[in-house]
Amino acid sequence: MAADGARQWWIRPAIRLGAAALLPVVVPAVITGLIWVLPGDPASLICPPEICSGTEELARRWNLHDGPVHFFMSWLADAAGGDFGKSWRIQQGSPVTPLLLTAIPHTAALVGLSLMMLFAGALGAATRVLPARADSLLSAIGLVPTVVMSLAAAAAVSVNYGASAFGDEAVRVKILLGALALGLADSALAGAARGVRGIFESERQRRYVQMGVLRGEGVLSNAWPNAAPAIAGQMRARTLHLLSGAVVVEVVLQIEGLGDLLWSGTLSQDFGVVLAATFGFALLSGALLLAQAAVEIAVALHVRRAPSVVAT
Amino acid sequence: MTRGRWLLALLALAFAASWVVPGFMAEQHLPNPDLTMRLAPPSEMPPFGADDRGRPLLDYALQGAGVVGIPALVAGLLVALLGITGGLLATVGGGRIEGVVAAAGELVGALPRMMVVLVVALLVPRDARGLMPIALTWALLAAPGAMDEAAAVASRLGGARFVEALRAHGFSRSRILLYHVVGLNLRPVVVRQGAETMMQVVFLEIALSYLAIAERQGSFTHSDDTHSWASLLDLGYKVVLDLPSWHALGLGLGLIALVAVTAVTASAAARAR
Amino acid sequence: MSMTRNWKRLTMGALVGLSALATCGSTLSFYEESLPTTLNPLYAASMVDHRVNELVFDRLYYHDPITNELASRLVTQWELVEQGKAVRLTLRKDIKWQDGKNFRADDVCFTVRAMLDPGTTSPIAEGYRSVFTGCEVEGKDKAIVRFTKIFHNPLNRLGFYVLPQHRFDGDAVPPDHDFSSHPTGTGPTSGNLGSKQVNFQGTQNGHHQPTITELSLLEGQDPLVQVKTLLNNGVQGIIAVPPPYRAEVSTSDDMSLKGYDLRSWWFIAADQTKPYLKDKKVRQAINLLLDRTDLRQLSIGVKPGEQNSPCEFISGPFVQASPYYNHDVPVSARSDKDRALALLTEAGLTDVGGRWHYNGAPITLRIGMKAALDNEAPDLLSQIGNQLGQAGFDRQTYKLSEDEWNTQAITGQLSSSYDLLIGKWSFGLVEDVNALFHTRRDGRGSKNIFNYSNPQVDALLAQYESAKTDTQARDAYHKLHTMLAEDLPYLFLWKLDTKSAWRTDVRGTTIAPYYYWTEIDNWKYGG
């Protein structure tokens, strides 16, 4: 059984690597399919025929004249070169790439700051610096939905900054407040701390760790190889959760991020923007899958290099 | 079942009923405004006071319950069922099926859920707007995690060996699977996952509706005739703007807390021995 | 509670003080009803678009907001030529485009050619195709614009925004050109469309010397947030203050309410293609079921008998102050349920269990309203629904986004989706309603919501178009008013005054009717 498990260690990382490679292609392909699934001519989404009589010409200009496969392949080829097409509705005719370039750093900052909170909480839980009794308090705070925490912050920012709410200082304040809301709400921090604590407490009970402690070694240094894959999986799930919540935070706080872009694109049926935003999310998700697979592979190789010890 | 577990289970049911059942009593349309009762506190317009147009907040609570109640329950049940399926597959040694499910789960679970929800929302025709398709989508996205966790529990039991051992004691296969595996061991996991999903669907609806209110758009989750609990929060948060709408904020947060307590109580009941 | 409030007030006070220092001589910010849909004047769809165009571009001719006389910042001389079928315009030589290139007669003729080009799929351009036949350049600063016929007021036909030829590859101006987000004009400011705001930079030119160097347009959020932000000097103005909040603004010493002459009137369009709405008796009955006084009181807050009401009932497609309004057509201020019941019965509807049926099937009215109107008239949609519901009609109500309204409602695509649509039309000094009521054909009736078609109405509209004098035009429209009040393709509700709020440290705020920013050069702020 253990030998079978050892031989099959590569299956999960391989699935993750495959998913990471497929996602940035599959997601835009699915969105492209949806464009043609919706009723009506795709070009009419850009400009209805009642307003724009030259729909065929419009379709040609927007590469919609030759079916979904042609459109998708062209889009993919352009995206590989950094050209994500043009906005269909939100800023009709304007390239999407500058919108992405503005959005990605904001989302990265928002999610990054929240992740730092989560990592700090996880580290504190692993090292017992964050006591177990803090979990209840964090869980209670975590019951508050993200939208509620973002609301009060949004009102205060709007009233106090007014027109400057899109200036540099206000954007920084909004990102900070948004990161706080993201990290605390929806049990993000509580879940991270509780999850990591559970893993490490479970490992602490194991004999190999206790033996290591008797030898004068640290708990973390002994436990992390076993705990790393599980923690990587948890952190990936938490990051995805933060990315999900970022949509709400960005719209409520009016931060020009990927989530806000996706929301606006969805409301306006701006598939140019939706394609680019979902591609961005798919890339991030792929990167997370890669990171988790890398951790799993590293741990597996580390274990394989370690001397064999018969369990007693 | 012990008395404590019964009590917790009953409490969970009562909490759930308190915010699901009233949804069936909601009127389709809010009444006409009464501007003389604008922002009336609960003491002047029991039980919850009035909005900024003098209409009872009770109507908002009822309509909101009607929006979230059934879809949230259905989503929770779906996740619980799929979790049970994952656990049973691990117990009976699903082999290739398990592998396929795991791979599908990796793909499905790889994307931020909100992104998938918004893409689904793009497709729903205006007349068919409602929370159910979004709730089912959310449940399907949450299912791989539930299935994984249930499979881990089943694996710790010993999987097929566990079944064989109990068969040797004379128990039937169906009893072992339904009672020993699901009833005794998977119960805490699947109930917790189901309860969390139910809670998340409610919070998701509030978030989506609030975003729509903020953008002055129709919501994806309900018709424009109906009001979500998000309307209570939209009114309530204006206390920071010196609007005396504390009662709306309290009601909104109270309803959210009620849903959270339902989920926590249900999980506790499932865990209790 | 009092400590919290004191803390909030201290913080707000400090921030107000800091913002006041910070805003001296800096950006003039204001809330608009929404972000513009485009910065290309040929594709302007909403009032926000029209107002923004006035900041970025110049119209060839415009009405002076103070004297009401026709004026031009681009033309120094004009003369009628070719027996009155053309005008020769001599342009100023000292005007530059915002990118530094010289403004020339080529640009005027390019704009005319663009409007005539079938590749320019703009409803605004389409309207000019029945006016112009072409344009010819004479040297760098003279252009001859040719008309389809002799107009008795040809300069009135030259109120279009001039576009730069050098920004386009050919004569056609498509809606998806980058120009829609990053335009170049000769107006007092240059602007670029952002996703959350639009920033404008003042541009010194031969004909514009704005003293305000930066403006920032923000999308208005919740009206309460807007007013509080204005109070805290977070912004300096709100273009349209909803009626429920005007009292708070007017009582403040730091702000003032200013009238914005926008001849807007509210209506409920009825879809006559629906079998149960085809008979005008049903539309008349619905008209009588509505109690406008109650609607106005509960949604806008105007009590019955209130003096100087900002909201005046109308019985036709003009405001009462308009010379085209026919005062002989009475307004229906209160409901008349008995008469409505009689009309519905005459039309063949039957009352089954308190609900109206047509041909044995229950009638469910699908009522839509532009969502943005909810700020000005809160709950109007649900109140109309309730009044019709109490009268025995089942109903479902919907809110339409700006985009849906502009791309689907106005283009007549919502017949299958709605029975009644609540909206608002706004006009400048030229109240031309032809596009609203003419049969949608050959470019006419471009804003005919439910594709209403009545040959007699078409005839009256043609009479207006061919009128040679103001009296003839007025007579045509008076008859139109009477006919539409009888046929009711729209149920006419009211005219609602629009008021802007500006902080008192913004001085010289002359607000032009309809276009708003025509006199922005004279506005002063800070410093």
Image (tube, coloured by chain):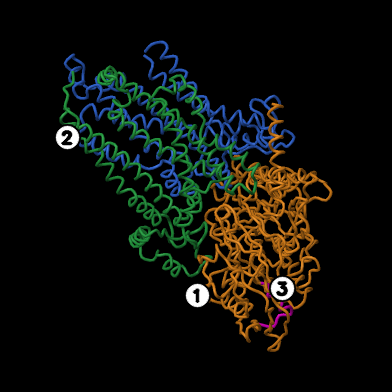
* Display colour for chain A: green
Name the residue nearer the viewer: A286 or C379.
Answer: A286
Tell me the amino acid under the disc marked 1.
Asp
Mark 2 closeness class: few <14, some 14–19, many ≥20 residues within 10 Å: few
Discs 2, 1: same chain: no
Classify mark 3: helix, strand or loop. loop
Find the distance from the CA under tag 3 to the CA under tag 1. Answer: 27 Å
Q: Nearer the viewer, mark 2 or mark 1?
A: 2
Question: Is residue A226 rendered magenta in the image?
Answer: no
Find the distance from the CA under tag 3 to the CA under tag 2. Answer: 82 Å
Task: Decide which of tag 3 and tag 1 comes sooner along the chain.
Answer: 3
Which residue is at the far top? B3
**Mark drawn on residue C169:** 1
Please identify the quadrant where the N terminus of chain B is shown. top left
Classify mark 1: helix, strand or loop. loop
Which residue is at the far front? A216
The residue identified by callout 2 is A7
The chain ID associated with circle 2 is A
Tell me the amino acid under the disc marked 3.
Arg
Q: Where is residue C417 drawn, in percent x and y?
A: 53, 53
Please identify the quadrant where the C terminus of chain B is shown. top left
Q: Which residues are magenta?
A: C149-159
